[in-house]
Amino acid sequence: MAKRPEAITRKLLRMILEASRDMYPNEFGAFLRAEEGVLVELVMIPGTVMGRRHAIFQTWLLPPNMNVVGTVHSHPSGNFHPSDEDRNLFSNFSGLHIITGYPYTEATWAAWTNKGEQVPLRVEP
């Protein structure tokens, strides 16, 4: 796997926050694609189930060679720290994981490693 991304474009961050708001009170979930260490795109997978307390991914439907480097999902509760279920997902899917929390602003999100450790993620213009 390539080096873990160290940045996200502001455009993608805003898209993630807007998608999280649009799905509220359900969770939003998708995969993340990077180019040269920067998160640049959401990868939406058919069949993803988004409910009030879960986002279930159909990982076998991920297209090959997409440079998918992690996941993103929202927490309608507002808590953007990983739950036990999140840490289980993270441990099964290496990379970077973003969690957004209600009210889905640029101050209510964080990035996490596959071990559940918070990591800084620079926001680029």
Image: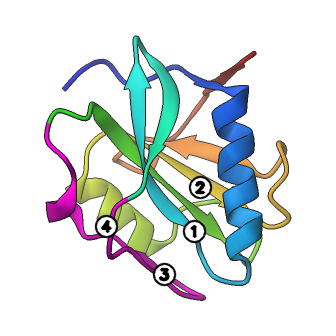
Amino acid under disc 3: His
Quickly name the residue at label 2.
99
Picture coordinates of residue 80 (x, y %)? 67, 60
Amino acid under disc 2: Ile
Mark drawn on residue 28: 1
Q: Residues within 10 Å of mark 2 (few under 14, many from 20)?
A: many
Amino acid under disc 4: Asn
Amino acid under disc 1: Phe
User: Tag 2, which secondary structure?
Assistant: strand
Distance from Cα at disc 1 to Cα at disc 2: 10 Å
User: Tag 4, which secondary structure?
Assistant: helix
Mark drawn on residue 88: 4
Indicate whether residue 61 is drawn in magenta: yes
On screen, residue 91 above or below 27: above
Distance from Cα at disc 4 to Cα at disc 1: 18 Å
Q: Earlier in the sequence, mark 4 or mark 1?
A: 1
Q: Earlier in the sequence, mark 2 or mark 3?
A: 3
Of the two numbered discs 4 and 3 in the rendering, the one whose residue sits closer to the viewer: 3
Q: Do the CB atoms of the residues marked 4 and 1 lie less than 8 Å apart?
A: no
**Residue visible at 18% across and 26% down in the picture:** 1
Q: Which residues are magenta?
A: 45-64
Distance from Cα at disc 2 to Cα at disc 4: 14 Å
